[in-house]
Image (spheres, rainbow, N blue to C red):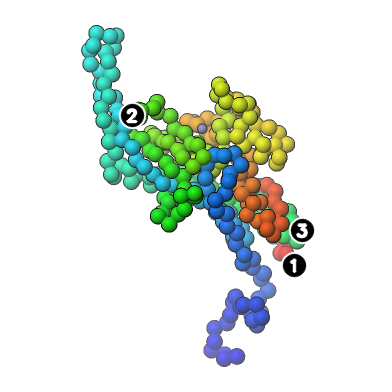
Amino acid sequence: MDPRAPIPVDAAPGGNAQSTIKVEHKDYTLTDYNIPTGLGKFTAKYFPAWGVMAVRVKCKFTFKDGLKYGGTIDDGSPGGQAVMAPAPWLPDDAAKWKETFLAQTSTFWTLNHLFVCTKKGRESLRAMVSVKFEEATAQDSSLEVMNLQVFNGDTRNDVAARSCVRHNMGELGRADLDNMVARHEAGHMLGLGDEYFEAGKGPKVDHSSLVEKEFGYQVLRGDKGDEPSIMNKSVTGTKVLQEHGVIFLDALRTMTKEDKLTWAFGSFASPVDVTPEE
Ligand SMILES: [Zn+2]
């Protein structure tokens, strides 16, 4: 061996590197994932060597002009008649909104969930969930993209203003960044359902079946009471619950099932087992 040659630190199989650290090189990818709740859309990758599961929500934004209150005119009625004026998006405002939305939602949903591998001999594997909301590019398949309409103004042109997400489509309002609504709707984009009571909706929360499988209890709408869970209080909720990780766990199991990896919830509070695998 040429003594001036660089020392190989990551030799190919059959190489002569004196490596004693085993590094897991195989990464896993999940595209066109059918979220079991029927809500939302994301892709994911799992990097065993880093212990990170990277969830990506690719967002395609369409900014819609709306209407704003422009005072009242006296038409003889009590208080007068409200006048609505056009409220167009200004290009700088739309760009700023998008940037804030992506940062706010990504930060909020990241580092809340950790999974540990329970397969014999692979117990040292970890998956810490990092979530990134990012703008979709032209290369992204339309099957992997959340289509978001963002309305300006006090009310929308046609329907009563109410932010919502269904499957791979959503509607948001400009003011959603001023409280927790954008972060709540982001939870829907990740597949989670509403936890608050709503007349005419079934008793079970959309992600209840997954929670029941994992934790042994159902999640019924209204049962959270005043708990400030992000999916319970869309305007004021501040908490991501451990049970909200069931969607990520399902995605992780789906993308690693070819190697029969099995997973369970881990806790950030308990010491991490660093015993190296054989
Ligand atoms: Zn909701």
The residue lying toward the viewer, choosing from 193 and 115, is 193
Q: Which residue is mark 1?
A: 278
Residue at point 36%, 35% (across, down): 151
Left or right: where 18 falls relative to 2: right
Crowd band around label 2 with a 10 angstrom C-alpha radius: few (<14), some (14–19), many (20+): some
Quarter the N terminus occupies: bottom right
Q: Nearer the viewer, residue 229 or 155?
A: 155
Mark 3 vs mark 1, CA separation in Å: 11 Å
Three-letter amino acid code of the residue under disc 1: Glu
**Rendered image: mark on residue 157:** 2
Q: Earlier in the sequence, mark 3 or mark 2?
A: 3
**Element under label 3?**
loop
Q: Please rate how many residues cluster around mark 3, counting C-alpha atoms within 10 Å: few if below 14, some from 14 to 19, many from 20.
A: few
* Residue under numbered circle 3: 120
Q: Position of residue 175 (x, y in %)?
A: 38, 34
CA–CA distance between discs 2 and 1? 63 Å
Q: Tell me which amino acid carries mark 2.
A: Asn
Single out the mark in the foreground, 3 or 1: 3
Q: Hey, what amino acid is under mark 3?
A: Lys
Q: Nearer the viewer, residue 155 or 131?
A: 155
Extreme residue toward the left, this view:
74
Residue 212's quadrant in the figure? top right
Residue 57, x across and y down, in percent: 49, 48
